[in-house]
Image (cartoon, grey):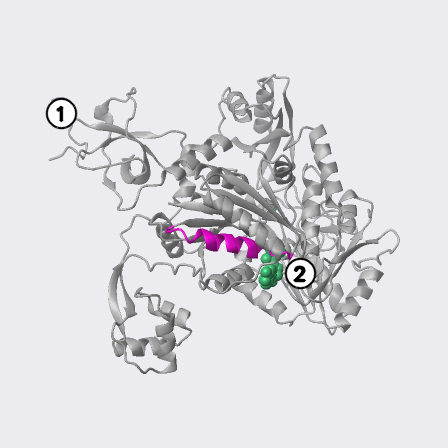
Amino acid sequence: MYPRNNKQNDPFEKQLMSELFPTRRIQVLLPLPLSGVLDYLMPEEMMLEIGDFVTVPLSGREMQGVVWSLNAPENDIPIEKLKYVVRKAELPPVPDTLIQFVKWVAQYTLSPLGSVLKMALSVPRKFDKPKKKIFYRLSEDLPDKMTPARQKIVDAAIEDMPLAVKTWKEIAGVSDGVVRGMIKAEMLVPVEVSGEETFINPDIELERALLSEEQKQAAEHIITQQRTNSFRTILLEGVTGSGKTEVYFEAIAECLKEESAQVLVLVPEISLTTQWLDRFKERFGSEPVIWHSEMTPAQRRRAWWATIRGEASVIVGARSALFLPLQKLKLVIVDEEHSTTFKQDEGVMYHGRDMAVVRAMQSDCTIVLASATPSLETMINAQNEKYDWLYLGERHGPAELPAMSTVDLRHYKLRTGSTISGPLYDALKENLENGEQSLLYLNRRGYAPLTLCGSCGHRIECPHCSAWLVEHQKFKKLECHHCGFNRRLPEQCPNCEAVDSLIPCGPGVERVAEEIELLFPEARLAIMSSDEISSPSALKKMVEKIENHEVDFIIGTQIITKGYHFPMLTLVGVIDADLGMSGADPRAAERAWQQLEQVAGRAGREKHAGRVLFQTYQPDHPVLKALVSGDKDLFLEAEAEARENQKLPPYGKLASIILSGADRSKVLSFSKELLKKSPQYDNVTILGPVPAPLSYLRGNYRYRFLIKADIEVNLQKTVRDWLSQMKTGRGIRVQIDIDPYSFY
Ligand code: ADP
Ligand code: ZN
């Protein structure tokens, strides 16, 4: 018997056994918030290599982890105390590139290695043996004549690949009955397969769009670079509607000519990409492998297995797709690279775009960052020739960029309670009469962002956060957009009990919709916000409704800015262009510009010319000037200069440390202690502690330090050394955010 169960207690026997069976001490990393690896013993008959998935005992339970090293250095844990690896999973090992990536992300974000591994292993029951299933393949002897419906199945077949009934239905576009009938007639024969149905690979031979000269050159540049199998970052900048997607589709198709090549496409919000997926399907004949957090466990498992086996060729996902066990990554695309949704603000705080560049570097492949409004960081890297820079300056076909202008609200005063100025009203009316669609943009969910008592002036706040409750008429309630707390809309002021005294202040999309309904009772309108669109299928329905022109006015929050293409949409009215222009966030202006440029880019994408009206009290603001003049370079230069002067990213480094806890005095005294120990270097500035802008969140008091450092400083080391001087007390949470994007 092999001494695997660690139950022998006789020290003599133990000694004897270890002499008889020389054992190997290995290191296993577990998906737990631990910084280090744990030592285990490798049973002799188990052939293990680095990256293997193994099951090990841990405090009376079994856990699954990854072999991190085959040679653990001797340490103070005697070998007799170590336990044996229980089992090795029947899976290929984690590719070395992913191991390197996990290490990098942990080191960069100052997160425990195990927490980062957890992101790579967030697949339920991934080590289960796949169940046996019956699929069907086309029989080798088929009759010469067949019904048209059956012929469709024959035409759709991909060689002799066995498929599920459901898949046959889908790819051939026939009914269940047709498939069943062919099974009965033995034209489809059953095959037992173990595991999941493989994904249908993209068909790169399908007819494709004829690229314009500009597009062709861009695609060729990417393809040439990709073929070198070396790391390079390419910025693909192109005005909205210029065909960036077509260009990188071309590069994907080329890349897939290489056997088992894998392409990773990161998109900001996968649930918002229905139009993108349709286009992919049109171009490649089938959907890509999708990866995001809202998938069912079975879907995740299927996608993960296909990836680790190297079967998935194009994977489209949210930032978490970076942690997939890709075997042969050959090209990475980050679409809408400027999007702040790539930044994860909880747990391991990493930036998906930046880490995608690292992933590509470690995999020796090309990465394309695509956007109409690239981030300043990326622009500067392109200017410094760290990145290649491709530019598409024209919209595809006859479409022109929309005409943009401001409506000065100091001059065109809004009536009390109204959000639509005279010029915007006229434009909306004209558009409606012409049978064209209009979009009203306001990045505020709900009816009103603040409810105030007209008698006592009381403002209704969230009991758990320092934030106002937002009125949602649709649900007849007040809701906190930070913690989700909600309550019924009260009839009396909760403070002075006055009746009918509560006044909604400021507009949200629901309120704009109410006004439009009054102004244009005959018009058909739709609200696009995360409250109305709570699932991918709801979104799909809405997109179809707009595409089919069943809607005249769309009133939307930022979810409408994400790359949509609606041919009949010709007018965009921005209700409050001043929203979000300034604030604690050093990127506020840049972000405002990106959002407005993107929303404006929805107008006039086909033959009908588009126009955009920005309602504003500050038409001279550099952001609006850049938009209206179309000269964004001037604005970006000014932004860059301002950041350089203040040594803010990308000209300096920034980290934030948030200390939080339910006991305010405890958090405060901890912060003060920490301040006393703060690093004293010339090129590092510590700001704080100050109450964070949201000083009370989900029942916790929050204090924040900002660490500003010159570019040459090793920020991670500075922060690590500083924090290691103090033990975090009970009830205090420390969150480190390297290169923060969120400033609340
Ligand atoms: P972007 O991503 O730059 O905003 P898209 O790739 O979405 O632009 O292209 C805008 C529209 O123009 C899409 O409907 C797309 O199908 C179409 N389009 C772009 N390039 C071509 C082309 N070469 N041939 C045909 N249609 C094209
Ligand atoms: Zn709250």
Q: CA distance from mark 1 to mark 2?
A: 72 Å
Q: Amino acid at mark 2?
A: Gln
Q: Quadrant of the C terminus?
A: top right
Q: What secondary structure is the magenta-colored segment mainly?
A: helix
Query: How many numbered marks are there?
Result: 2
| Image: magenta residue range | 241-260
For mark 2, give the secondary structure. loop
Q: Residue at x 74, y 49 (%)?
A: 496
Most foreground residue, 388 or 266: 388
The residue tagged 2 is: 473
Q: Would you say residue 530 sits in the magenta stretch?
A: no
Mark identifier at residue 10? 1
Q: Position of residue 725 (x, y in %)?
A: 51, 19
| Identity, as a three-letter code, of the amino acid under mark 1 | Asp
**Quadrant housing residue 178:** bottom left
- Kindly identify the residue that appears in the image at 27 percent across and 40 percent down: 55
- For the point 53% across and 31% down, the residue is 734
